Image (spheres, helix red, strand yellow):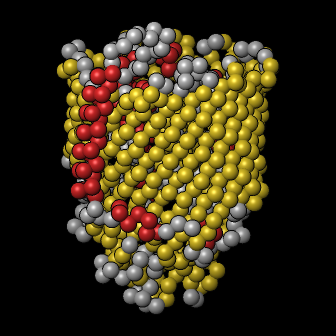
Amino acid sequence: MMHVAGLAGFERGSLTPAWCALLALLLLSSAGSVRGGEADAPGPAQPDKAPVTSAVSLEDDLTKLTLEDLTEMEVTSVSRRPGQKLFDAPAAVTVLTPEDIRRTGHQHLPELLRLVPGMHIGRSNAMRWAVTARGFSDTFNPAMLAQIDGRTIYSPFFAGVFWIAQDTVLEDLERVEAIRGPGATQWGANAVNGIISYTTKSAQDTQGLLVSGGGGNTEGGFGTVRFGGKAAEDLHYRVYAKIQEHASFDTGDPDYSDDWQRWQTGARFDWAPRDGADTVTWQGDVYGVERAGSSLRAPNAAAGTDGEDIDDEHYGGYNALARWTHKLGEENQTQVQVYYDYFQAKAPHNEEGRGSVLRAAHGTIDLDFQHSLRLDARQRLVYGLNYRTVDLEIQNGWIVDFDPSGRRTHAISGFIQDTITAIPDKLDFTVGAKLEHNSISNFEYQPSLKATLAPHKDHLLWGSVSRAVRVPSLFENDATLLVGVAAPGVPVPALPNRALEPEELWAFEAGYRTHPYSWFSLYLAAFHNRYDDLIGTRLISALPPAFKLVNNERAHSSGVELTATFQPFDPWRLTATYSHLDAWSTESGSDDSAPRHQFHVRSYLDLPHDLELNAALYHAGSVQRFKIPEYWRADLGIVWRPVKDLELSVWGQNLLEDEHEEFRDDGIATRSRGRVPRSVYAKLVWRW
């Protein structure tokens, strides 16, 4: 069992000296490695070895990709088999390249997802985001699965992602795959409305020294140091450290502060022998997040008030992952992966220091095996096994009471997926299923059937039917939550329910892709989702009042998503997306937690004299649940490369208005409304 005090070193006040020392040591070791590499450089040439590609040349290559090259990009999240092309994937998937990441100016992982049609990104304050696909938005969205380099960042505790605690070096991202729609057959329970997969580059592709930094009125100050080197003939590595401070949003409440500081450091090693049959990866990260000031509110039953200020929030954790990929043939490979992930969340005390609101820690061990192979000319098979165990330990506070305060859960699952070619180069069918047994809901099955039809090499139709489930979280199973007070000494609790059934989705999807000209591509997706056994609340006692979590809701949603990319000439690329959503639930009728209409257009323009002009325009419809009006947002960035290895940029975001509201926390710990302000920041990236 874990100890909640295990991250005591992450407390406020211990970061700055340690971090300065860490950065200094990293810079010194990096400089020493560079000098050592120069001393070892003389020697015989090795023409049979491919030269190491620097980050600079790799990014230069990516900016020159044609639209046809982009459609040929490999995606791995849809079928979990290597070699599948984006154009042929039977799912509503968007791939963000390093060019998209660099040329849109976003500095946080959830902000990148604004580029994806059908996804709603609503920032409720400086450190919280609602990230969802196809409706039913929530700050902790239980129906979206997210991962970084194959490591799940979905929390089994709250059933959602603590986005403020998730980060990586943005310059090291190889791609972001965002799938709207279920992927439970491949990834298991909780991959209901979508999957987000962040993949970083190999250590071989991040050689040399990178230093980046900058600051602005809201982004505060941020800095990254990353060094990649070669430890042996076939062994490459990189180490990094980054730190960031973010200013508080202006909410009109002088007692409200949501500024935060985050630090993170990590390393990656990649071993790839010359024969190309094996690849071994090891990587790990350590991080901490601090938030100070009167940031949250919670009920105080003793005082009979609904709003008592809570000081400080702290998040921290570490992780380690190892992965071995072995190629048995041209389309035959196995992969074994294991990781450990530890996460801690603390909201320690109120202004008088009375008690703890909540301290929670969980450690996850995950072991995964998969094998992909071609059976014959018409069949490609992927199958795998997974085991996961989670240890949870809680220090209860006055608003949350877990019973028991410590728990260990287990889940074991297997999946199989067979792609059958009915007509070569024309018609494929994919059938698969995931079987799982877990400690919370026992046995689950999640099947899918998909088909692709290519009437012409530049046109593809696809469709799918699938079932996915969302397993109740440990919070919903074990935690009594204080949701309000009826009078002094009369609390209003929401009681847990260990008899909860999993939430169920049946999804029906169809799509069309075309690339009729070298300068134009069009992607279209449509869907209809039917949800059953959604978890809601029921009043079980009027005096004293009390609620209980029950499976008492149903819902459905339908919509369309469109992406069009236009490149009239080589230096200019224009991408536009649009999504429409209709959603309904038994709780509120028409779902009003996400906009019905969303639109965005972005432009990448290369100018003479090594200049770039990047612009984006976003529109989101109203969020009726919180009476948030529609908003328009414009971002503009100018990038200049005075020399090959140096990049200078200035970015303006939310330029059309002083501030706007996007989303609102709907929980008991909501302190105030956050409004996203206009911001300007400058950034420098230097590679050597």
User: From this viewpoint, is residue 361 visible?
Assistant: yes
x and y, in percent, of residue 28 in the image: 25, 39
- Quarter holding residue 170: top left
Identify the residue shown where x is 66% and y is 69%: 550
Q: Is residue 657 left or right of residue 472?
A: left
Identify the residue shown where x is 61% and y is 41%: 337
- Quarter holding residue 229: top left
Residue extending farthest bottom: 489
Q: Above or below — where is 404 with respect to 46?
A: below
Q: Is residue 102 left or right of residue 150?
A: left
Quadrant where the C terminus is found in the figure: top left
Q: Above or below — where is 74 with respect to 316?
A: above
Quadrant where the N terminus is found in the figure: bottom right
Identify the residue shown where x is 42% and y is 16%: 51
Observer-nearest of 524 and 49: 49
Observer-nearest of 3 and 41: 41
User: From this viewpoint, is residue 613 visible?
Assistant: no
x and y, in percent, of residue 142 in the image: 57, 55
x and y, in percent, of residue 152 in the image: 55, 48
Q: Is residue 666 left or right of residue 645?
A: right
